[in-house]
C-alpha cells in the first residue's frame, strides 16, 4: 500500500498537530457537479453507478479533481445493506429511495439474513479496492454505513417518511421486535464496515441521519446503543492501525457527551450546535467534525469566507477539528462556492495551528 501524501484528516481525527484544518464535504460527489450529472446520464441510474466499481471510483474522485479536499468518501449509499438483505432497493425520480419488500411483520424480521459483505455486497468492496488503487495515497478514503436506527426507518417505512408512523409504531408497540431488527442490522453493519476496512477504507463514518427524531431516552435505547456496539465491533485494522470512527447524529447536539462516551474517535456536528461549545463539552475525549450550514453556500463568496472564519474562531486554536458542512451539500449548490469554502478553510485556519 502506498504512503499517504496527505494525512491531515487522519491526524486531526487523532487530535495530532496539522499545518491547516483538514476539510471534506458530506455528499461531496453528487448532483451539484455537472461532471457527475454527465456520467450519471451516460451510466443510467444512481444504482448503476454504485454497482459498477470503475464508475463509482470515477465519481468518488470527481470532487478531488476540482477542490483541494483532504479526504475522499466512497461513492455508495447507506441503503446497500437492506438491499443485500433482500428488500429490493429502487429509486423513483423525485421521491427518493424505496423498498419493494419493506419490513412489516415479525416473520419479516425473523427471515432477514445478515449479508456476507464479500458476496452480495462485493461490488462495494470492489469499489473500495479500485478507489484505493486510483487514489494512490493522495488522501485517505472514508468508508461508511448508516446507523441501525436510520437503516431501520427506511426498512420499516419502505422509503422516506415525514412522520415515522410505522417505524415509531413498531418501536413503541413492539420494542422487542424493534430490538431484534436493530440487532440484525447492527451485526450486518459491523461485518460490512470491517470488510470495507479490509478492502482499504482508512476511516469510517456512521450516518445517523434520523437519530435526532427520537426522545432522549429512545435515542439511547434504539440508536446510540447500537452505534456503541458497532464501535466496539470494529476490530479490523488498516495497515496496522485502528481505524478512526466518526459518529454523526443529525440533531444530536444535546447528546454530545453520550455520543463521545461510545468510544468513537470523532463526533460529527450539524450546524445547530456551536462548535466551540461542543469542544468545551467533549473536546478532550474526541475530535469534532463540522459544521457549516450547507445553505451558507447559497450566499456570496465573502459571506462564505466570513462563516468559515467564525467557525474556526469558535473552535479556537489547537487540534482535533475536521472541517465539514453540517450535513450533505445541497443539490443546487454552486461548485464555485464549494471551492471558495474549501480554500477558505485551508487559508484561514493556518493561524490556529502554530504551536
Ligand atoms: O458523501 C458522499 O459523497 C458519499 C456518497 C453518499 C450518498 N448517499 C450518495 C447519494 C452517502 C454518504 C450517502 C448517504 C445516505 N444515503 C444517507 C445519509 C445521509 C446523511 O447525510 O445523513 C441517506 C439518508 C441516504 C439514502 C438516500 N440515497 C437518499 C435520501 C437519497 C436522495 C434521493 C433523491 O432523489 O434525492 C439517495 C440517493 C443518493 N445517494 C444520491 C447520491 C449522490 C443522488 C443520486 C442521483 O440521483 O444521482
Image (tube, grey):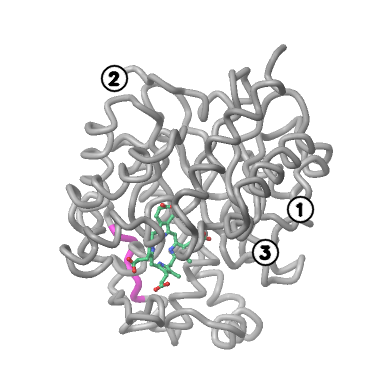
Front one among 280 and 291 = 291
Q: Earlier in the sequence, mark 3 or mark 1?
A: 3
Mark 3 residue element: helix
The residue where tag 1 is placed is: 273
Q: As drawn, is 281 to the left or to the right of 198? A: right
Disc 2 vs disc 3: Cβ atoms closer than 8 Å? no
**Residue name at image x 79 percent, y 38 percent:** 314
Is residue 12 positioned above or below 212 on the image? above
Front one among 142 and 265 = 142
Region of the chain picked out in magenta, as a range: 111-115
What is the magenta segment's predominant secondary structure?
Answer: loop
Front one among 14 and 216 = 14
- The quadrant the C terminus occupies is top right
The quadrant where residue 289 appears: top right
Marks 2 and 1 sit apart, C-alpha to C-alpha, by 38 Å
Marks 2 and 3 sit apart, C-alpha to C-alpha, by 41 Å
- The quadrant the N terminus occupies is top left
**Residue name at image x 35 percent, y 47 percent:** 74
Q: Earlier in the sequence, mark 2 or mark 1?
A: 2
* Residue 289 appears in the rendering: yes
Q: As drawn, is 63 to the left or to the right of 271? A: left
* Residue 249 appears in the rendering: no
Q: Earlier in the sequence, mark 2 or mark 3?
A: 2
Residue 2, which numbered label? 2
Mark 1 within 8 Å of ligand 1, using the beta carbon: no
Classify 10 Å Cα crowding around label 1: few (below 14), some (14-19), many (20 and above). Answer: some
Amino acid at each position: 500500500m502506498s504512503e499517504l501524501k496527505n494525512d491531515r484528516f487522519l491526524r486531526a481525527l487523532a487530535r495530532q498537530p496539522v499545518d491547516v484544518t483538514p476539510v471534506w464535504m458530506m455528499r461531496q460527489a453528487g448532483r451539484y457537479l455537472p461532471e457527475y450529472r454527465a456520467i450519471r446520464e451516460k451510466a443510467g441510474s444512481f444504482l448503476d453507478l454504485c454497482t459498477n466499481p470503475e464508475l463509482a471510483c470515477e465519481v468518488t474522485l470527481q470532487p478531488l479533481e476540482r477542490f483541494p479536499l483532504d479526504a475522499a468518501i466512497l461513492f455508495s449509499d447507506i441503503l446497500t445493506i437492506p438491499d443485500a438483505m433482500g428488500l429490493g432497493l429502487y429509486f423513483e425520480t423525485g421521491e427518493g429511495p424505496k423498498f419493494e419488500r419493506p419490513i412489516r411483520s415479525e416473520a419479516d424480521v425473523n427471515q432477514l439474513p445478515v449479508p456476507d459483505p464479500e458476496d452480495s455486497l462485493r461490488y462495494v468492496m470492489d469499489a473500495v479496492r479500485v478507489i484505493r488503487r486510483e487514489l494512490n495515497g493522495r488522501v485517505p478514503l472514508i468508508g461508511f454505513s448508516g446507523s441501525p436506527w436510520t437503516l431501520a426507518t427506511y426498512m420499516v417505512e419502505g422509503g422516506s417518511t415525514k412522520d415515522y408512523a410505522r417505524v415509531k409504531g413498531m418501536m413503541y408497540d413492539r420494542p422487542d421486535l424493534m430490538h431484534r431488527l436493530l440487532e440484525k442490522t447492527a451485526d450486518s453493519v459491523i461485518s460490512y464496515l470491517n470488510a470495507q476496512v479490509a478492502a482499504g477504507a482508512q476511516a469510517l463514518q456512521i450516518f445517523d441521519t434520523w437519530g435526532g427524531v427520537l426522545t432522549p431516552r429512545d435515542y439511547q435505547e434504539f440508536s446510540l446503543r447500537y452505534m456503541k456496539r458497532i464501535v466496539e465491533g470494529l476490530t479490523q485494522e488498516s495497515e496496522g492501525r485502528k481505524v478512526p470512527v466518526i459518529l454523526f447524529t443529525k440533531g444530536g447536539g444535546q447528546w454530545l457527551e453520550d455520543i463521545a462516551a461510545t468510544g468513537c474517535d470523532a463526533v460529527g456536528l450539524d450546524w445547530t450546535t456551536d462548535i466551540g461549545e461542543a469542544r468545551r463539552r467533549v473536546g478532550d475525549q474526541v475530535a469534532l467534525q463540522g459544521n457549516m450550514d450547507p445553505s451558507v453556500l447559497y450566499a456570496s463568496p465573502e459571506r462564505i469566507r466570513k462563516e468559515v472564519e467564525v467557525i474556526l474562531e469558535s473552535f479556537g486554536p489547537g487540534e482535533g477539528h475536521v472541517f465539514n458542512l453540517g450535513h450533505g451539500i445541497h443539490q443546487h449548490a454552486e461548485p464555485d462556492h464549494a471551492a471558495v469554502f474549501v480554500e477558505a478553510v485551508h487559508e484561514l485556519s493556518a493561524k490556529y495551528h502554530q504551536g
